[in-house]
Each structure stands twice: as C-alpha cells, then as structure tokens.
Image (cartoon, rainbow, N blue to C red):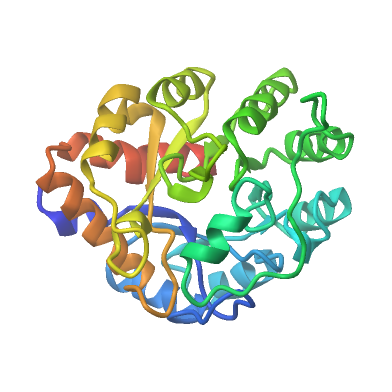
Amino acid sequence: MNIDDLVRGSIDMHCHHAPDALFAARMSALDTAKCAREMGMKALMLKSTFYNTAPLASLINELIPEVKVYGSICLDYEMGGLNFYAVEAAAKCGARMIWMPTHSSTNSRPKTQSRSPGVTLLEGDGFSILNPDHTLVPQMDRILSIIKEHDLILASGHISPPETFALIEEAKSKRISKIIITHALSTHGMLPGSESFTLENQRKLGQMGAFIEHTYVNFMPTDFRDDPKPMVEAIRYVGAEHCIMSSDLGQYYNPPPPEGMRMFIALLLKNGITDREIELMVKVNPAKLLDLN
C-alpha cells in the first residue's frame, strides 16, 4: 500500500487552527478541512486552548461535508479551568472531546513557555487536577460524570503521569471507555523534578483501555526535533492496537495538519512500522473513538 492510500480515510484527532490566542496559526479550520478533503482524509478533531470548537466544527461540516469535523474544549485558564459548566455547554453544542489542562497544567507550563516559539501564556503558575493528598480535586467528579453521560472522549492534555493514572482509574470506575493519553512521548513533562511516561506507564495505560497518542509535531525542526526511534520502540512495546497517530500541527511555522499526517506516515514507514500498524493508528482506532464505521 502506498502512502497516499494510507492517508485516504485517515483521521487526525489533534488539529490546531486559526484563530488562536496562543500563537499565529498556519490556516483557518475551514482551510484545514479543505486540505484534508483534497487528500481524502475522513475526519479531523479541532483543538483550541481558549474556546469551544464545536460550533465552528458544525459550520464547517455544512461547508465541507466530505470530511467529518469534530469540536472539543481544553480545560485551561481561558475556559475557566476545571469548569464543569463549560464541559456541559460544550457537550450540548456537540463537542466530542474534553481535554484536561494543557498549557495551564503545572506539569507543562514552564516547558511550554521556554520551548514553544511564539506562544504567549496568560499569567499564572498553572494548576493540577490533584489535591495535595493525590486525590482528584472535587470538580473532576462532575466533569467525568458529564463525559460519561454524553459519551465523550476524555483526553489527558498535558497533565503528569501521577495525575493521569488517578484520572484514568476514576474514569474507568465511571465506565468511561473513550480515553486518549495525549502525546505521551512529548517533552511537555520533562522538567527537572517532573516525570515523563515510561514504556511501562504506556503499556499499563493501554491495558487499562486508553489509546496512547503519538504526534508528528515532535519531529519538526521548528519544534522538538525528536528522534523517531523511541516512538517506534513505544509503538512496538505497547502495540499499535493501543495507539493513535495525530499531527498536533497548525502552527504558522509548520506544515498544514493533513500534509503533516502524510509526512508522519512516511516517517514511521521508513522506520519499520508496517502498513497494518499505520492503518490501526490512523483509521481503525480513531474511528472507534468517534463511532465512525
């Protein structure tokens, strides 16, 4: 199977777009959907850290019916933090994914400010979803209940491994089945004194029913410049059946998300990942999360 065949029918669960208050974006959500249509992609998940993208997705679906576009919200400062009112409103507007804190997470905040070009954060030290005794803060019970009630996808955002395990254990107790561990190999958590996700962490989370997300932005020369070998090792160790591939692109200095997906597929193929593994990560597994046939 050639690369274009693998791109056709693929799903990108992590697309940035204009307008965005954190950084200048490469293109609008509408132009991103047009680009996805040209490449034969099946679906996109729009991500913004400062507004609910569900209404935008709804409008784009009317204009570009060939690509299914979904909305989401991130529980960052801009959305009021761990704001269950915002989660409820987003669900009623048709959002399909709720991200835990990203750039507002205490685990991510200093690294984001120092390593992400062009990103301007609101003032504040960030926040955690855990109390000092390592239990989830009270707001999380209501948030997870709304996610369960509306059958939404829970994404971990930029929270730490201890926060993530506490979150997933509680989510599983509420019988939430659609879970993504956001770019588990990214450098967001790699700060002095903080933890990153080990291979064993990732395998355990996969066994708990979560999908481990791998993103192409890690390899861009404008961003993190990572070596693909650890990602290939992680996919092999955890199993492609427990992973998804996303672009995490949309920044003005990077390729458009659909082209990034094509480049990502090509990169992993060159590093030994098989056609079947690619199909699981870009088609089969995201389709399960979105209830797409």
Q: Kindly tell me whether residue 195 is visible in this rendering.
A: yes
Q: Is residue 58 left or right of residue 263?
A: right
Give the mark count. 0
Identify the residue at the far front of this view: 192
In the foreground, 186 or 114: 114
In the foreground, 97 or 237: 237
Q: Is residue 287 left or right of residue 105?
A: left
Q: Note whether 238 is above or below 57 in the view shown.
A: above
Q: Kindly tell me whether residue 40 is visible in this rendering.
A: no
Q: In what quadrant of the picture does the C terminus appear?
A: top left
Place residue 185 in its image quadrant: top left
Residue 222: x percent and y percent? 33, 70
Residue 127: x percent and y percent? 76, 48
In the foreground, 82 or 171: 82
Residue 138: x percent and y percent? 89, 34
Q: Is residue 267 left or right of residue 260?
A: left
